[in-house]
């Protein structure tokens, strides 16, 4: 049984000049100045633990306190996903996981330039969320959302070539890892290294679409660490006040590099931040495909109806270090044990098998198919050439020949004036 | 031909572009009903509607980020900074998100970031700066600083039509102090091209924005002594018109670089290096820099006067250089 924190946005409170409650008032008369809010919590378990800094044996380290003994709950039935869709998401997750394993191996073979970033333990969040997007929607992935880029239509070889800095990578070798996008077909905005910066940009994408008469869903992610930045606030607040269809997944994976979530914020759940922006907030178990998808789907539908942003907090844990060089020794071992049991792929596999949506034979076939695809992509990527040195030049500016910029969704709406609708006019160029 | 102030010329330029191209829209603080802190967008919201003249919260990172996002869908946003001094608040979005977009992942960013910059208005450290070099230093951006009303209109139109991100610095001292003939018809002034504001044969002064008028005033004084100054108005700081710089040095062989900006890291240093590379053999004297001192812009009028380059500085340096 799901217990909801029963808090309802109280419209009458907005008209009150004084929102302060009476101190110590516990009378039976309901306090009219008390504001109440609702945060939907779809989880079937609500673990409570804290990560503290302690001094032990002459060292300062992290320790986790709280109950980590609970059994793994079942996957919560989805309201929307059918068998075909569920199997597709499962396959995306397998591709996501195995691609990252392949990247790790390539790194160990010395074929990768720079580091590798893993979304281990977060595949359900990346894949099920992006699966809720439609063709006209946009995605802004972050570093651990490589699964979402696969869902969106990039291939494993694209990502591998990025990591290996090959000439045929989506950025032609000019940027690394998940720092790529596509404005023509897949509608993906390339991230930059600083955190939170995608949020106002995706809000702007929704703004541009709306100016062309369309309400679309735009989806991006931010971590428990990344959400501490100022630009996160600015972007989300802007989306809220403008009612832009931003679906923001706050991926609370408990660690921002080596800094635990308990050192990033004071609130109990990041979804509570939604209250401060005036938008709906939802909590989901980030290792549960169905919960992630349902929340994403509902938020996208809201967005497409022009009802504005939604903040979805997905709870899970980052199961490797910040990047491949980081052994994550600072993570208390009991936490790894707890979350290992909640592996999103294992959980969903069990769910599909138990529903007879997948037989163990079909599962083997599916896995083999994924591995074959990855093998082919890997071979292609490894064999592909490095860029020519001179290819570093050019492209700093967009000159007249390289791009034709025109509105994506249709003619932008203009206000009819007495002089009629704006028409393009020829230009006389004066050189003075 | 109508006489327009520098400010009115910019206003008309943006207005005409919004009429001409429905993908152009304005976004910024207080630009709607208020018409902008300096009234550049006065009347826009009534004519174009609130959808295309968007008042934002005080969130410069969001203004630039959202403008960039909208440009990815094919729109051409014109983002206003109430004072260009506040551009620091959006610095990361501009230099990391926007400037690198085309080079990195092939996404053009056809947005214009515009606002008032410059001093001599007793604005103090946060309302008088010349932040242009922060952006000249970031490859991928174009930086424009008009000095005349004619150029202001032509350049803002060209900037809006440019597929690249343009940072458009409007010198606030010039907003209402200069008024000149501006054609009523549609015209543009190309980015990346300097102009000869005054022809001369003895010395070249290469400068931009409000200092163009300081140079022209000095030129009048020096003309009476038989010293003919050539004044080059750069108009665009990035990309620089290297050919115009080289040409004037070949012509006069002596050059003064004049900037209202603080000395260190200003465009004068960059131009001096370019002159060294392109036309060193044409020089008959050292390259002279006239700049503000390396400090924040002071507030009190006598201090600001001390801080800013003056007509008398140009006259003095020109006489000295002529005699070299």
Image: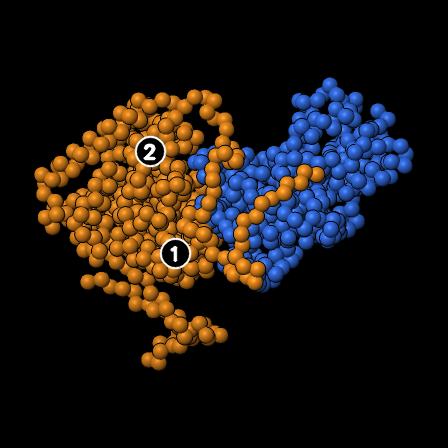
Image point (79%, 26%), residue name: B252
Question: Which tag is nearer the camera, tag 2 or tag 1?
Answer: 1
Chain given the colour blue? B
At x 38%, y 71%, the residue is: A10
Query: Which residue in the protein does label 2 denote?
Result: A159
The colour one sees for chain A in the rendered image is orange
Judging from the image, mark 1 belongs to the subunit labelled A
Residue name at image x 35 percent, y 38 percent: A322
Image coordinates of residue B152 in percent, x first then y, are 67, 46
Left or right? Give the position of B78 relative to A353: right
Dot 1 falls on a residue whose secondary structure is: loop
Q: Are the residues flagged by discs 2 and 1 in contact, CB closer than 8 Å? A: no
Which label's residue is closer to the chain start, 2 or 1? 2
Reading the image, the residue beneath label 1 is: A215
Residue A325 seen by the camera: no
Q: Is residue A279 left or right of residue B32?
A: left
Chain assignment, label 2: A
User: x, y (%) of residue A404?
Assistant: 47, 40
């Amino acid at each position: 049984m799901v217990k909801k924190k029963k808090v309802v946005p109280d419209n009458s409170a907005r008209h009150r000049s004084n929102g302060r409650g009476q101190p110590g008032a516990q009378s039976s008369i309901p306090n009219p100045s008390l504001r109440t809010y609702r945060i939907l919590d779809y989880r079937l378990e609500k673990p409570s633990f804290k990560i503290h800094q302690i001094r032990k044996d002459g060292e300062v380290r992290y320790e986790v306190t709280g109950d980590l003994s609970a059994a793994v709950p079942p996957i919560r039935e989805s309201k929307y996903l059918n068998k075909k869709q569920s199997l597709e998401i499962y396959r995306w997750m397998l591709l996501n996981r195995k691609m990252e394993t392949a990247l790790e191996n390539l790194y160990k073979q010395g074929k990768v330039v720079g580091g590798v970033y893993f979304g281990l333990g977060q595949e359900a969040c990346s894949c099920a969320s992006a699966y809720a997007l439609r063709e006209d929607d946009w995605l802004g992935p972050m570093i651990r959302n490589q699964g979402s880029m696969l869902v969106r239509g990039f291939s494993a070889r694209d990502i591998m070539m990025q990591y290996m800095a090959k000439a045929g990578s989506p950025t032609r070798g000019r940027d690394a890892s998940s720092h790529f996008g596509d404005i023509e077909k897949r509608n993906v905005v390339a991230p930059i290294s600083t955190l939170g910066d995608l949020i106002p940009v995706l809000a702007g994408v929704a703004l541009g679409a709306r100016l062309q008469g369309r309400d679309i869903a735009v989806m991006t992610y931010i971590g428990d660490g990344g959400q501490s930045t100022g630009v996160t606030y600015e972007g989300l607040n802007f989306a809220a006040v403008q009612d832009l269809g931003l679906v923001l997944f706050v991926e609370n994976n408990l660690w921002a590099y080596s800094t635990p979530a308990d050192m990033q914020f004071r609130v109990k759940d990041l979804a509570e931040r939604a209250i401060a922006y005036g938008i709906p907030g939802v909590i989901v178990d980030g290792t549960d495909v169905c919960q992630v998808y349902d929340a994403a789907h509902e938020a996208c539908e809201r967005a497409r109806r022009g009802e504005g942003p939604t903040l979805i907090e997905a709870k899970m844990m980052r199961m490797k270090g910040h990047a491949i060089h980081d052994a994550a020794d600072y993570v208390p071992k009991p936490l790894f044990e707890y979350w290992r049991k909640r592996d999103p792929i294992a959980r969903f596999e069990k769910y599909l098998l138990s529903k007879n949506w997948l037989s163990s034979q079909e599962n083997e076939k599916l896995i083999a198919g994924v591995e074959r695809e990855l093998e082919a992509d890997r071979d292609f990527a490894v064999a592909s050439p490095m860029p020519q040195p001179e290819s570093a030049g050019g492209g700093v500016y967009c000159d007249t020949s390289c791009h034709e910029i025109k509105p994506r969704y249709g003619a932008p709406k203009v206000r009819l004036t007495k002089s009629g609708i704006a028409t393009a006019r020829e230009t006389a160029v004066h050189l003075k | 031909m109508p006489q327009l102030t520098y400010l009115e010329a910019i206003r008309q330029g943006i207005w005409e572009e919004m009429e001409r191209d429905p993908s152009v829209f304005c976004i910024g603080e207080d630009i709607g009903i208020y018409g902008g802190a300096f009234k550049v967008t006065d009347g826009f919201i009534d004519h174009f509607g609130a959808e295309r003249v968007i008042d934002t919260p005080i969130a410069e990172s969001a203004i630039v980020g959202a403008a960039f996002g909208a440009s990815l869908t094919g729109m051409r946003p014109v983002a206003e900074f109430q004072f260009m001094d506040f551009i620091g608040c959006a610095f990361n979005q501009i230099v990391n998100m926007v400037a690198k977009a085309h080079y990195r992942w092939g996404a053009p960013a056809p947005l214009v970031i515009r606002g008032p910059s410059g001093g001599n208005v007793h604005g103090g450290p946060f309302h008088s700066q010349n932040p242009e070099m922060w952006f000249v230093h970031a490859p991928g951006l174009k930086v424009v600083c008009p000095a005349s009303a004619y150029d202001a209109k032509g350049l803002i139109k060209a900037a809006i039509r440019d597929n690249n991100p343009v940072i458009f610095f409007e010198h606030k001292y010039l907003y209402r102090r200069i008024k000149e003939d501006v054609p009523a018809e549609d015209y543009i002034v190309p980015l990346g091209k300097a102009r000869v504001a005054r022809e001369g044969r003895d010395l070249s002064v290469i400068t931009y924005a409000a200092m163009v008028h300081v140079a022209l005033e000095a030129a009048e004084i020096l003309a009476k002594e038989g010293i003919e100054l050539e004044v080059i108005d750069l108009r665009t700081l990035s990309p620089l018109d290297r050919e115009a710089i080289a040409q004037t040095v070949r012509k006069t062989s002596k050059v003064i670089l004049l900037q209202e900006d603080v000395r260190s890291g200003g465009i004068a240093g960059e131009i001096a290096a370019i002159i060294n590379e392109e036309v060193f053999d044409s020089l008959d004297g050292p390259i002279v820099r006239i700049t503000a001192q390396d400090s924040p812009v002071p507030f009190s009028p006598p201090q600001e006067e001390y801080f800013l380059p003056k007509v008398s500085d140009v006259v003095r340096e020109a006489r000295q250089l002529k005699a070299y």
